[in-house]
Amino acid sequence: MAQGNDEYYVKSGLEFTAYENWQSAKGNLESANEVLEEVKEEKPMLEEEYADAKYELDRANNNDEYKERRAIFDDIKTRLDAMKSKEKTAQDAFDALDGDIENLKQAYDDAKKDREDYRQFVKDEADHEFDDYDPTEGPPSLPEEETPEVNGGDNNGGPPPTTQDSG
């Protein structure tokens, strides 16, 4: 039965890994979507600020005006570039995860079914019932090792070893 326990542990571990992958992807997809919503709200205002700053920079009449307006323009351009980069990263993540989420869910469902099928098989064939497993409660615990019955003290059924005092 030790091999059966080990096999059930492996199948539970595969289910846990598939569940964690799926949940992680769902969380990352949600985060990417939140960033995209944030950018969608803030980007138009920043683009308008950029256009205004560019217009003012182009209208500078002397070196002092140019330096002052250039600093403002550069600051806004830096923020706009950072927002565009943030948007691209979030969009790339969203696109990658959006397509994968169903595959990850299917991998979890398959791993769960494999574990449940094995549990039923062992119950039917060996009349042994494994504890049910829920991946939301964490990784599976290691199977308990079966200890052979011992007559005396060693695994061969002989008397326990004696110790000699060296004094």
Image (tube, grey):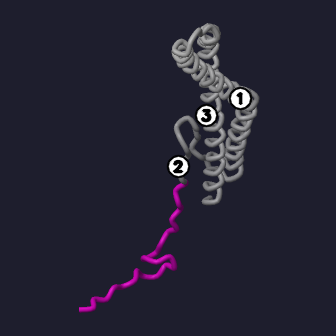
Which residue appears at 65% of the width and 32% of the height?
A: 25
Residue 89, image x, y percentages: 66, 29
Pair 1/2: label in front: 1
Name the chief secondary structure element in magenta: loop
Residue 53, image x, y percentages: 60, 11
Pair 1/3: label in front: 1
| Mark 1 neighbour class, 10 Å CA radius: few under 14, some 14 to 19, many 20 or more | few
35, above or below 106, in the image = above
Outermost residue, front direction? Answer: 62
Span shown in magenta:
143-167
Identify the element where label 2 is drawn: loop
Q: Amino acid at mark 2?
A: Ser
Residue 156 shown in magenta? yes
26, above or below 132, in the image = above
Outermost residue, bottom direction? Answer: 167
Quadrant placement of the N terminus:
bottom right
Residue 154 shown in magenta? yes
Residue with the mark numbered 3? 24
Residue 63, image x, y percentages: 55, 16
Q: Earlier in the sequence, mark 1 or mark 2?
A: 1
Q: Earlier in the sequence, mark 2 or mark 3?
A: 3
Q: Amino acid at mark 1?
A: Asp
Residue 50, image x, y percentages: 62, 12
Q: Earlier in the sequence, mark 1 or mark 3?
A: 3
Residue with the mark numbered 1? 92
Q: CA distance from mark 2 to mark 3?
A: 21 Å
**Residue closer to the observer: 21 or 32:** 32
Residue 75 — which label? none
Q: Amino acid at mark 3?
A: Ser
Is residue 103 shown left or right of residue 12? right
Q: CA distance from mark 1 to mark 3?
A: 16 Å
Residue 141 — which label? 2
